Amino acid sequence: MNINGHELAVEISGSGPAVLMVHGLGGTSNFYQVQADALQDNHTVIRVDSAGAGRSELAADISIESHADDLAAVLGELDCGPADVVWLGRFRSTPVVGEFEHRRGSIGSACWRESTPPDASTYAWPCMP
């Protein structure tokens, strides 16, 4: 899917309420294959390889803000609005979703956080401005 000038690998499976899965630093959407398989009978599962990860193109701008903008654009392209559940991966996904919500409003009605630092509001990705 062409998002913000670069190609992102987006996997969509199943039907029903949307579940957006956001992988963490060093991960890919494949990390959630087992969960996606289990949820797709009753949900639309959306998995995105972030820019520069997995099968997605490396974007000119890689930042927490650009990843948040990419998620917003994916949800807009799919016309699914806020997801019913957002499944967060390790570390990087928490500040990305936080940035999304700070700039654009709610990304979903519920969040499942996996391995999130105790104070994710102060977590900084090394080498990021």
Image: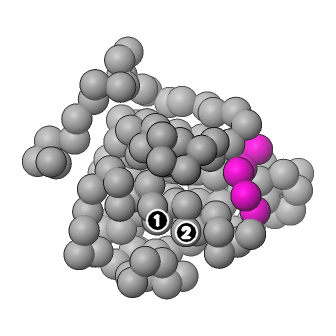
> Magenta region: which residues?
80-85
Q: Nearer the viewer, residue 97 or 46?
A: 97
Q: Which of the labelled discs sits on residue 107, or is there none?
A: none
Q: Residue at x 32, y 50 (%)?
A: 64
Query: Which residue is nearer to you in this view: 101 or 9?
Result: 101
Query: Can residue 97 be seen?
Result: no
Tell whether position 84 is magenta: yes
- The three-letter amino acid code for the residue at tag 2 is Ala
Q: Could you tell me residue 10's position as x and y percent? A: 56, 71
Q: Is residue 100 left or right of residue 81?
A: left
Q: CA distance from mark 1 to mark 2?
A: 5 Å
Q: Label 2, on which residue?
A: 73
Crowding at mark 1 (Cα within 10 Å: few <14, some 14-19, many 20+)? many
Q: Quadrant of the N terminus?
A: bottom right
Look at 48% across and 40% down and name the residue there. Answer: 102
- Farthest top residue? 118
Q: Which element carries disc 2, helix, strand or loop?
A: helix
Local SS, label 1: helix
Task: Tell me if residue 43 is in the magenta stretch.
Answer: no
Q: Position of residue 71 (x, y in %)?
A: 52, 60
Q: Taken as a whole, is the magenta stretch helix, strand or loop? A: loop
Q: Is residue 126 above or below residue 43?
A: above
> Which coloring applies here?
one colour
Residue at the image point whose x is 86% and y is 62% from the top = 15
- Residue pushed farthest left? 127
Image-quadrant location for residue 72: bottom right
Q: What is the three-letter code of the residue carrying label 1? A: Asp
The residue pinned by badge 1 equals 70
Point 65% across, 75% down: residue: 77
Residue 49 shown left or right of residue 43 in the figure: left
Q: Position of residue 19 (x, y in %)?
A: 71, 50
